[in-house]
Amino acid sequence: MTFSGWATIVLFAVILTAFAVPLGGYMAKVYTGKRVFLSPLLAGPERALYAILRVDLKQQQDWKAYAKSLLIFSLAGWLLLYLILRTQNAFFVPHALNPLGYHSAPWNVTFNTVSSFVTNTNWQYYGGETTMSYLGQMMGLTVQNWLSAGTGIVVAVALIRGIVGRSGKGIGNFWGDMVRTVLYVLGPISVIGALVLVSQGVIQNFTAYLTARTITGLTQTIAMGPVASQEVIKLLGTNGGGFFNVNSAHPFENPTAFTNFFEMLLVLIIPAALVFTYGRMTGNRRQGLAVYATMMVMFLGAVSVAYIAEAHGSPAQHAAGLHTHVISGSGGGNMEGKEQRFGIAGSALFDVVTTVTSCGAVNSALESFTGIGGAVPFANLSASEVIFGGVGTGLYSILLYVLLAVFIGGLMVGRTPEWLGKKIEAREIKLAGLGILITPLAALFCTAMATASKGGRASISELGVGPQGFSETFYAYLSQANNNGSAFAGYTGFIQPKAGNLGSHGVTFADLLGGFDMLFARFAPILFALAVAGSLAGKRVSPAGLGTMRTDNTTFVVLLIGVIVLVGALTFFPALLLGPIVQGLTGHLY
Amino acid sequence: MRRDILTSIIAIVVFTILLGLVYPLFITGVSQVSFPGNANGQKIYVNGKLVGSKIIGQSFASPVIGKNGKAEEKEEELVTQADPRYFQSRPSVTEGGAYNAAASTFSNRGPNDKATKEADEENIKSYLELNRLYYPSLTVAKIPVDAVNTSASNLDPEISQANAWIQAHRVAAKRGLSLGTVNGLIAKYTDSRGLGFSGEPGVNVLGLNLALDRLTRGK
């Protein structure tokens, strides 16, 4: 461990908060229909989009109408993306947008990929530069990066509206929220962010792959493409699907230690800001602060564990005789699967940032993390992505936990639980409970199916021996259920003998199981969150009395952390024991 | 229901044009005008020929020429041998030979795998064979981890300073340069930490090797 490593972690938390507070305020204005500084520029396009979509903003939707619009829109996106990916070398696709003439992936892999991008998961059984045309990446995957992110955000906003609503059943208008999210939130940050990335060395072009003749007489082919425009929204929307196979470890996606820091900020900025938006919209900023504190404490805990574990090195390295402490000119540690420019701290921090959120981008190989270092992403996923979480999904998920904590707290002090002046009754608790349990259920069910069947075990990599094989499998379905998309990349659902998809085939079992895992664990919790919003929206607000349990002080933060850890640990501990914990506790090699 | 379907279809088409076409083309246009070098991959030309990209790692091994005068192949991959006159990049396991920048990949070596230990041992052996002659006190305990562990992308353009300082003994001897001159070049091609605190310093191998070639071309 080094001083600069710890400094990176601390400064990151400070800078993130400094940006998140003003952005949270800005977003609160956007979603309450107030004027913001970008209004003179964007009000015109906004009105034009409403006209084209024939949307009347005055028409408030109740939760069922909101959910219906959301589901049908997602389905339309699913179908179009499937069409685009399955016709990437059709006659009408211009050569410039598929310069290498790549064929489409088989139906089962495409089913998995499409489900993955529409659910904001971006699980990838394919390698970008060896299977995807520029057209598929740009008009297919990038578009869903925006829209699936938008879907998450609008659900969170709708839930906040339900919590604060005083006038009946309306929780907003789905189309209005989506248009505003794209224009006012994702749009400006993406355009500026993409240009910052290009200024540091991320590529953005449509040329065919380059062929270089190296100085020792070898030939090197170098993949190209419109990377920056996809990179920025992949991070900002907590999507995580890399343009290249190795994601943000690729020098063309993440060229320097500065871009690494900037990319981590992009990932967390909206999830962090939304917490402050919540505080503003409820009219009580301390509510937002309490949730933020909960997330930050758990986040810093996770980062510290990962950093210490990775800096220590792995049993395999030590068995080979390597010394992994810091020496002059080398940071030491477990450098297997890590890039020199990021070092141990930059890699550990990045992977915690992207696994607490539903981003799932990686800048180092999770499969090569030490047992305990690799257990951190597991733990983050086991907390069902409520530590910041995905854009929107993080907030609506943790608010369900808040509801549960209020209920448990209420039982402990023997009062009718109240939250922000609204009585919490059986219906809300049932809905929140289901919303919380869906994701773990999907993850464990799929892991069990995949471990117990021949079809599932076919996906385990050659190197996945002993507990590593179980870790791979468990992580795959846990990550897909949480719509995260990071992977112990040895687990595969796609056999591709050579670049361009010729002769390639999918592993149907893994592709379909994973696809349904993602779809179910994405849309079912959304429905429960919206139902909670609808249920709360109609409730009357009673003034806080002496007996009201406060939800904005330290006691509540501790209670909330306790509830999250308890639910996560009780659900996942037995499974975690079999994989990463075994590996972390033993020096034994398999 | 029908209304939602209609709105969805219009919306997905409009958003696809806006976000899938207008947005990336706008970014491409601005990038190509403002940062053409970066946007196109920081290509490096020597005598008008493309030798690589500044930020993509390369293999500095030469093809082994067999008895028949042709480059040897094994399992459709060229057999290569590290060229001792050049600084060597980190190990790479990309398909079709090291540093294939058209197919980046993780090595996916687990922390508790025997295979990982064996791969490390093999890399340690090659590293010692290559450098010990010129740096007799080199032992496995002194080898910096990056020299024998694969990177994440397997396209890492950089090595650690400690790794470069060890290799400097060999390169200086092979090229008839003083160790001081080579270490001076290493310092010149070392990228410092981002913003002064983030990440680790690293030595750009391709940049360094090209500078060495320029320096010793006359000799």
Image (tube, coloured by chain):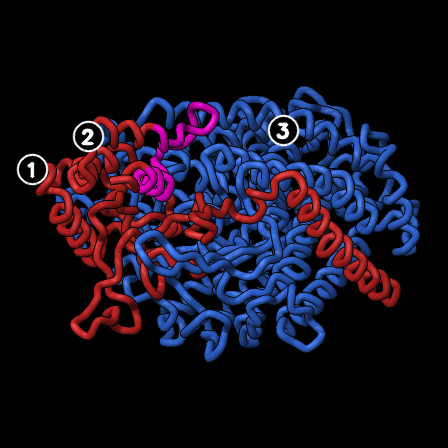
- Residue positioned most to the bottom: A503
Q: Which residue is mark 2?
A: B179
Distance between mark 2 and mark 1 Cα atoms: 15 Å
Helix, strand or loop status at disc 1: loop
The picture places residue B172, in percent across and down from the top left corner, at 19, 36
Identity of the residue drawn at 44% across and 23% down: B196
User: Which residue ends up furthest to the front in the rendered image?
Assistant: B218
Please tell me if label 1 and label 3 are on a single chain: no
As drawn, is A492 to the left or to the right of A187? left
Residue A520 image position (x, y, % from top left) = 59, 62
* Residue type highlighted by circle 1: Pro
Position of A13 with respect to A334 (left or right) is right
Q: Residue flagged by tag 3: what amino acid is it?
A: Ala
**Residue A20's disc number:** 3
Which residue corresponds to the image point at 90% horizontal and 52% vertical from the top-left?
A55
Q: At 90% across and 45% down in the image, what residue appears?
A: A47
**Image position, residue A478 (x, y; %):** 46, 56
Q: Which chain is blue?
A: A
Q: Which residues are magenta?
A: B188-214
Q: Which chain is red?
A: B
